[in-house]
Amino acid sequence: MVLVYIDLVEGKLKKSAFEVASYAAETAKLLGTNAYAIVLGNSTDDLTSLGKYGITKVHTVAAATAFDAQVFTKVIADAATQLNATVVIFSNNLNGKAIAPRLSVRLKAGFVSGAVALPDVSNGFVVKKNVFSGKAFANVAIRTGVKIISLNPNSFNIVVVDGSAEVIAFATPVDVSKIEITATNKVTGEVLLTEAEIVVSGGRGLKGPENWGLVTDLAKLLGAATACSRPVADIHWRPHHEHVGQTGIAIAPNLYIAIGISGAIQHLAGVNRSKTIVVINKDPEAPFFKAADYGIVGDAFEVMPKIIDAVRKLKGA
Amino acid sequence: MKILVCISKTPDTTAKIAFADNNTKFASDGVQWIINPYDEWYALVRAIELKEVDATTSISLVTVGGAEADPIIRKALALGGDDAIRINADSHDSYYIASQIAAVAKEGGYDLIFTGKETIDYNGSSIGGMVAELLDLPYISLATKFDIAGTTATVVREIEAGKETNQANLPLVVSCQKGMAEQRIPNMKGIMGARTKPLKVVEPITIDALTTLASFDLPLAKAGVKLVSADTPEELVRLLHEEAKVF
Ligand SMILES: Cc1cc2nc3c(=O)[nH]c(=O)nc-3n(C[C@H](O)[C@H](O)[C@H](O)COP(=O)(O)OP(=O)(O)OC[C@H]3O[C@@H](n4cnc5c(N)ncnc54)[C@H](O)[C@@H]3O)c2cc1C
Ligand SMILES: Nc1ncnc2c1ncn2[C@@H]1O[C@H](COP(=O)(O)O)[C@@H](O)[C@H]1O
């Protein structure tokens, strides 16, 4: 059986949940077995809906509410052992990064983080993962009986099937956490950068925060998230959580639009997995054009208002 | 407080990524090695700041690697570590590396273990969690702030919808990212002093790796950029809509 850990964000299922559910179901198919999910905490979404992504059973542990990697690992390890999981799958998102390595140690199960494709089971069990910040891939063989994989967000297409999952409470003790959550500070009303299908991003070429309307207006029209280069966050034109790249967030949207960003290798490291890259830069020699699919060599202050207008017309807004 | 900072070496961020030996090895000829940025800028510098506030704090560094890691660990000592241990082994397997670090950590009895968010070459983001599990300690990952009062740590970590503040008692394992501290440049005094700081080389414990790196691939080259004239930006919107079908 393939077991997938489904993360709740504010009690809700997010896009990454459907991706890992589909990935687990497809992996189970390759191995000729079923895919079950485990959900910790209280869901406000209907968990039977995970059946639409190929999950046949959902095991829930309602008592595990506050996130603690140590506590959650024990619960998931119990489930994996009692239900005889041979593969355990996580999203390589923030919580996945905290739990999956611990589980690997607890179960002595080989772990590959940041997978970008289904495992190759034709000869052993080999998982393709991102390395060198998206600049290359490594094929890693897992040698243990139980295997753990974390899937990079936005790397696997959701597969929708006809089905409804059975939801079952899984009985297991939940330890008292040694970590107390004393505050949460939510960024609300914005599209989550790591989940966004489209990201509009600005660099130092935009000259100052007062010009960011060129980025945010387009983002709003496209339902996109906004991002920026590192210097832009460092000089406080934009908040730090928007910084993408080697030392910031790594993203892989369907469309990344870079405005006034030179395309330094450290910036590319965070965005080079985007499916389509559009670059707007006044310097034809900007390195970003080498990584781009579409581009305009031109002044953002002249080009962007026209682009925004054209999108507005297209959207009938 | 005794802090252990995990330091790894990575190719310089601008290094050309190429592979040798039938795509089984990173082609390291002529590559300049640096301290993994997350380990240096965030984990190590925050440890140094904690020591600046409380002089009874000690900072030990640990790296798992061959002799070519020595200049990296010396640079980390120059920035402000007190002593260092190099475990003389080369491996890609996170479980193997974490087991080595955990063995050293057990012996040293540290109050706080800092790792970076991830290595920028292997991108595992795993060692911190593994070390924590091996030592049965709480783990706070992807921290953007760390403060200590007595034996209680207050840590801000990134969550999907924003930030969360956690409190926990030492001992503790924390992985560090942007926000924890700012990059520093080692000064002459630090560089001179680092030469005489203790760097102990120990042999690894026997551990079986759980995974094997079979091969590397490079992504397919892009077809090349399609340029649209700056006089007709609306043409770009048409192409994205009709050809790329991205909106
Ligand atoms: C170890 C390390 C890690 C790093 N990590 C990151 C990271 O995670 N993310 C990151 O982004 N950077 C990172 N950097 C920094 C990176 O090397 C670059 O310095 C940075 O990405 C440059 O940002 P920028 O493109 O916004 O600015 P610049 O390099 O100043 O480029 C501005 C661009 O705007 C263009 N421009 C100017 N005016 C206009 C106009 N009117 N219209 C259109 N275009 C215009 C210019 O032609 C230029 O190409 C890192 C560096 C190091 C050493
Ligand atoms: N070989 C190593 N020696 C010491 N510490 C390491 C080593 N590899 C990784 N680390 C630490 O673990 C963190 C996460 O690495 P990784 O799990 O490989 O992405 C790094 O930022 C380092 O702090």
Image (cartoon, coloured by chain):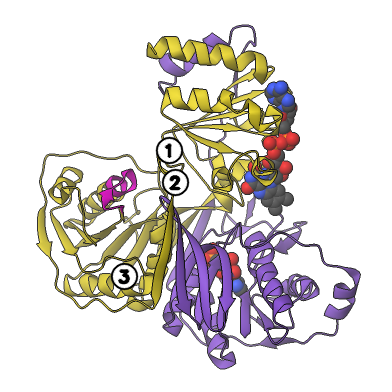
Chain colours: A yellow, B purple
User: Callout 2: helix, strand or loop?
Assistant: loop
* Amino acid tagged 2: Val
A143 left or right, relative to A61 = right
| First in residue order: circle 2 vs circle 3 | 3
Which residue does the numbered mark 1 point to in the structure image?
A: A190
Does residue B141 show up magenta in the picture? no
Residue visible at 57% across and 33% down?
Answer: A201
Q: Is residue B117 above or below residue A18?
A: below
Residue A194 position within the rendered picture, expressed as x and y whole percent measured from the top left: 44, 44
Question: Marks 2 and 1, how far apart in space?
Answer: 7 Å
The mark lying in front, picked from 3 and 1, is 1
* Ligand 2 - quadrant of the structure image: bottom right
Q: Is residue A244 above or below residue B142?
A: above
Which residue does the numbered mark 2 point to in the structure image?
A: A187
Question: Marks 2 and 3, how far apart in space?
Answer: 24 Å
- Whether pointer 3 and pointer 1 mark residues with C-beta atoms closer than 8 Å, the reply is no
- Whether pointer 2 and pointer 1 mark residues with C-beta atoms closer than 8 Å, the reply is yes
Residue A283 position within the rendered picture, expressed as x and y whole percent measured from the top left: 74, 23
* Amino acid tagged 1: Glu
User: Callout 1: helix, strand or loop?
Assistant: loop
Which residue does the numbered mark 3 point to in the structure image?
A: A72
Boundaries of the magenta span: A9-19
Quarter of the view holding residue B46: bottom right
Looking at the picture, tell me which residue is in the foreground, A196 or A64: A64
Binning the other alpha carbons within 10 Å of mark 2 as few (below 14), some (14 to 19) or many (20 upward) gives some
Chain ID at mark 3: A
Residue A131 position within the rendered picture, expressed as x and y whole percent measured from the top left: 54, 54
